[in-house]
Image (cartoon, rainbow, N blue to C red):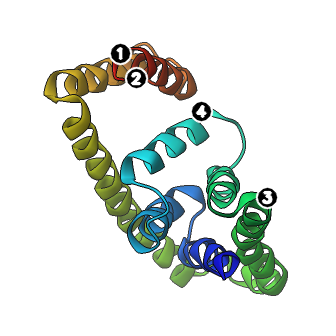
Amino acid sequence: MILLHVFWAFFIPNILGYGGGPPIIPLLQAEVVDHYGWMTLEQFGDVLALGNALPSPIATKLAGYIGYQVAGIPGAIVALIATIAPTAIAMVILYKFLHLFKNSPQVSAMTQIVRPIVAVLLGILAFQFFASAYEATGIWQTAALTAISLLTLEKLKIHPGIVVAGALVYGGVFLQ
């Protein structure tokens, strides 16, 4: 039964997550943290940060790790299949329609409408992570990490993976 829950926890967000990895993350967080309770928000944030530091699509990395944590190797396989299946099915079935309607104003309008929704979902997720970090580490360390991350990303143009890795090292050394 747990494998069925793992399948649905990853299949539903990937069916509904229009636009790739970023829109899927809040939906996946709702399933894994809120609905099934397999992880805390802090654990999900750690997995997300680590997954963002590694190459390849974020959804498959999250699926493999979380599926493995919940149900071992069979859980990882089921979670990966549930993550990949919606896209594979859609690509096979909808390829001709996509080619026919790629310049349609309705498709363009749909894409324009979805973008702000994705931005709001990611903003809510970021706020939840920030609030969780504030509760766990306090205002000064949270503010310092936020400011240093912003500075290194925007002004110094350091790769986000390096910034995430640096924050992970800082947290491992100073926040235990």
Find residue 73 and name its label: 3
Query: How busy is the neighbourhood of tag 3: few (under 14 within 10 Å), some, or many (20 plus)?
Result: some
Tell me the CA gap for discs 2 and 3.
29 Å
Q: Can you give x and y, in whole percent of width and height, for residue 90 in the image?
A: 75, 80
**Secondary structure of the residue carrying numbered label 2:** helix
Q: First in sequence: mark 2 or mark 3?
A: 3
Tell me the CA gap for discs 1 and 4.
20 Å
**Is 49 rendered above or below residue 120?**
above
Query: Where's the C terminus, which quadrant?
Result: top left
Query: Looking at the image, which residue is at 16% across and 21% down?
Result: 140
- Observer-side mark, 3 or 4, equals 3
Tell me the CA gap for discs 2 and 4.
15 Å
Q: Can you identify the residue that label 1 sits on?
A: 174
Query: How busy is the neighbourhood of tag 4: few (under 14 within 10 Å), some, or many (20 plus)?
Result: some
Tell me the CA gap for discs 3 and 1.
33 Å
Query: How busy is the neighbourhood of tag 2: few (under 14 within 10 Å), some, or many (20 plus)?
Result: some
Find residue 171 and name its label: 2
Given residues 85 and 92, the one toward you in this image is 85
Query: How busy is the neighbourhood of tag 1: few (under 14 within 10 Å), some, or many (20 plus)?
Result: few
Horizontal relation, residue 101 to residue 126: left or right: right
Find residue 53 and name its label: 4
Q: Can you give x and y, in whole percent of width and height, for residue 138 in the image?
A: 17, 29
